[in-house]
Amino acid sequence: MNQLVVIALGGACGAVLRFLMSTGLYSWLGRDFPYGTLAINVSGSFLMGLLSETLILQRIAIGVEYRAAILVGLLGAFTTFSSFSLETLLLIEQGNLGKAATNTLANVGGCLFAVWLGLLLGRAVYRYSDGVIYWHGGTIPYSLMVVNAICAFLMGIVAAILMQKVPLAAEFRATLIILMIGIYLTLSGLYLILFLLEQGVAFSNPLLPAIFIGNSLLCLSIIWLSVYASKQL
């Protein structure tokens, strides 16, 4: 039952993110081509490959429920094969065979490439010393922090789209962005701490809050950089 609840919560968050991101992209780029669905499917596939490697294949100490919430709930609801299928069929019915073929190739080929790239990147960050650095008797999970930074970069892009392109009231937009970033920083820092505890680091060790704060500052910096870069487009 717990697993069903967390999948439902993850799915709700993924569906909302998909709606907001697709709405923003269509407002930005227009509806002549299904840019929103393509961007969502490719970015979701990349995260699926990256996080599958991180959370499952590398045996990170995080419960089955949390993995299911992220991979099945959040990313499963974020990506959409049905919208891609409908949009492609509508292009065919409108006589836009070239766009329909391009959309099909871009979604299928782009998603496969994105999953492969995510898996490759996930394996690369664990290549050195199994993803951790031992320093002054402590353990620093640099690989997980790199993964957090990559996800923070993508979150910054989504935040930029929300701020610039989604037609929402300013106060609601600000609240939504603050909640997204706050939840992300909390959860990403939490599984770093869970990993360290699994590695035998004592709960009273000052390394735990230091890693949590360091991860939060790193992710906030990356989010700010990606938002700034997105605004220049």
Image: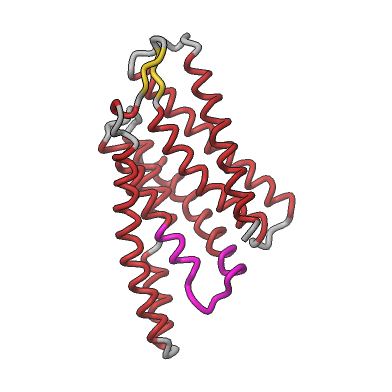
Total labels drawn: 0
Magenta region includes residue 181 = no
Per the rendered image, the range of residues in magenta is 23-42
Q: Is residue 181 left or right of residue 97?
A: right
Q: Is residue 38 left or right of residue 199?
A: right
As drawn, the residue found furthest toward the left would be: 57
As drawn, the residue found furthest toward the bottom would be: 95
List x then y, in percent, for residue 109.
31, 66
As drawn, the residue found furthest toward the right would be: 170
Q: Residue placed at 40% from the left, 51% from the top?
A: 75
Between 86 and 47, the one lying in front of the other is: 47
Main secondary structure type of the part rendered in magenta: helix
Q: Residue placed at 39% from the left, 26% from the top?
A: 141
Q: Quadrant of residue 221?
A: top right
Magenta region includes residue 36 = yes
Placement of the N terminus among the 4 image quadrants: top left
Q: Residue placed at 35% from the left, 39% from the top?
A: 67
Residue 47 position (above or below residue 196): below
Residue 207 position (above or below residue 64): above
Q: Quadrant of residue 79?
A: bottom left
Q: Is residue 40 left or right of residue 131?
A: right
Between 221 and 78, the one lying in front of the other is: 221
List x then y, in percent, for residue 174.
69, 47
List x then y, in percent, for residue 80.
40, 62
Q: Residue placed at 51% from the left, 24% from the top?
A: 212
